[in-house]
Image: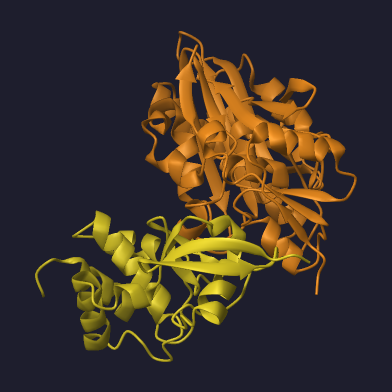
Chain colours: A yellow, B orange
Amino acid sequence: MTKRAVTVNVNGTEHPVQVDAPDRLIDVLRDELGLKSVKEGCSTGDCGICAVLVDGRLVNSCLMLAAQCDGRRVTTLEGLAEDPSMKRFQGTFIANNAAQCGFCTPAMLMASWDLARHNAEPSDEQVKVAISGILCRCTGYYQIIDSVRQGCRKERP
Amino acid sequence: MSSLELYSPTDLNDALRFIEHEDRNVAVIASGTDLLPRMRKRQVSPSVLLDISSFTQDLRYIRRSDGKIRLGALTTVTDLLESSLFGDELSMVREAATLFGAPQVRNVATVGGNICSAASSEDLIPVFMALDADLKLVSMNGERTVHLRDFIVGKRETAMRPSEILAEVSFGLPEGHGWTAYEKLGRRNMLILAIVNEALALTLEDDLQTIRSARVALNRVSGRIPAPATKTNDFLRGKRVSDETIAQAQRVLASELSLSNDFRASGAYRVEVAQVFLKRLIERCSRMIGGPT
């Protein structure tokens, strides 16, 4: 099987990588680039734990072939670590104990950050829709919903 | 290690030329949200993936012309949600898109992929069937148009030839006093495959009492195949909207459904839900048109 050369912009840096046909975006992000905030859960699009932004849209990185990302712009949690909006969510998630095992937290933060770009005052319902593709199996969703709503506000609560 | 190959054509012609001459088992991949999990579960094992996801210039559009809406096959579900065309009498399209998967899936999943998957759990198939949509299939030999209701011939089986690619879905607006509505039941609200989904396009005569046309379509009518409920549709034509008509239509619908049990629900439960949905759909559409409620 011949590998193909693909260039993906990840967190602002162009990364030339060699990929096989079945390689997925998550494989490149975790195994080639060492971006371990991207978790692999179900691998079938049911849990959403692998969520990243591709060209500014939230997607499941386990359901996208790496070869399909040639020339595209990918953002993971690592790329937003110093972003002011993301820092707000980090603060509210800590304040509300919105992480227990923490496995879903990177994806929840990505979905929160994505929501905050469009909606500064989301309702509970809007937050539920925004995180509806991401499963949390331990914290319970209410601490997360509170954290997302508070973090979306430009001013700290 | 699998011997899977990926072919990324430069344009649509290149893609059509490739599948025209390729003897191996080819799967067309757009976003992959349906295909990749099925490959992972070894439900399908293509030798070659033909990646059409980059043809957004040619195949990702929402146009309205000559009283018809035309959707390029690579239109995403999020594109449907962000379009201004799916309010008012076509609001059913937005309702279905809202209940489709979750944001990460909607952002990439395509209209064409949903139709070509041809599964009984697809959210958009009953919607487009209720709108009596046509499909444009292209190949090296030109293009042909197939009614969606004739396109799905079995569980995950379509009338598409191996040398064809789905290019466009088109449908007319409900004429005159028309409205559309959609209902879906799953085990939870979001990120769930439907137990029953049901769509209705209803038009009333000028008296706003008599049904001019009713097109109900469900994710399953017989076995696991999405289809229009033709007997119910025939029954409703010319009837006055009333509790009696709805009750009779529910019985007709139950008589034409032939549903088996599976791990999601029993056939009897699906029939019950489909009848409840029929009442809701007729009442919702009639109310929005200004007819009896």
Residue drawn 39% across the image and 91% down it: A100
Looking at the picture, does residue B110 appear above or below residue B41? above
Q: What is the count of numbered marks?
A: 0
Looking at the picture, does residue B58 appear above or below residue B115? above
Residue B21 vs residue B124, the one in the foreground: B21
Residue drawn 63% across the image and 40% down it: B10
Judge from the rendering whether residue B219 lies leftward or rightward of residue B176; answer left or right.
right
* Snapshot quadrant of residue B260: bottom right
Asked whether residue A143 appears in the rendered view, the answer is yes
Judge from the rendering whether residue A71 lies leftward or rightward of residue B214; answer left or right.
left
Q: Indicate the position of residue A156 as horizontal and vertical percent values.
A: 10, 74
Residue A49 vs residue B181, the one in the foreground: A49
Quadrant holding the C terminus of chain A? bottom left
Residue B53 vs residue A8, the one in the foreground: A8
Residue A74 vs residue A123, the one in the foreground: A74
Residue drawn 24% across the image and 77% down it: A82
Quadrant holding the N terminus of chain A? bottom right
Asked whether residue A65 appears in the rendered view, the answer is no
Looking at the picture, does residue B85 appear above or below residue A126? above
Q: Furthest residue to the top? A: B206
Q: Indicate the position of residue A4 as horizontal and vertical percent values.
A: 66, 62
Q: Furthest residue to the bottom? A: A101
* Snapshot quadrant of residue A37: bottom left
Judge from the rendering whether residue A46 lies leftward or rightward of residue B42; answer left or right.
left
* Snapshot quadrant of residue B6: bottom right
Q: Indicate the position of residue B164 as horizontal and vertical percent values.
A: 77, 33
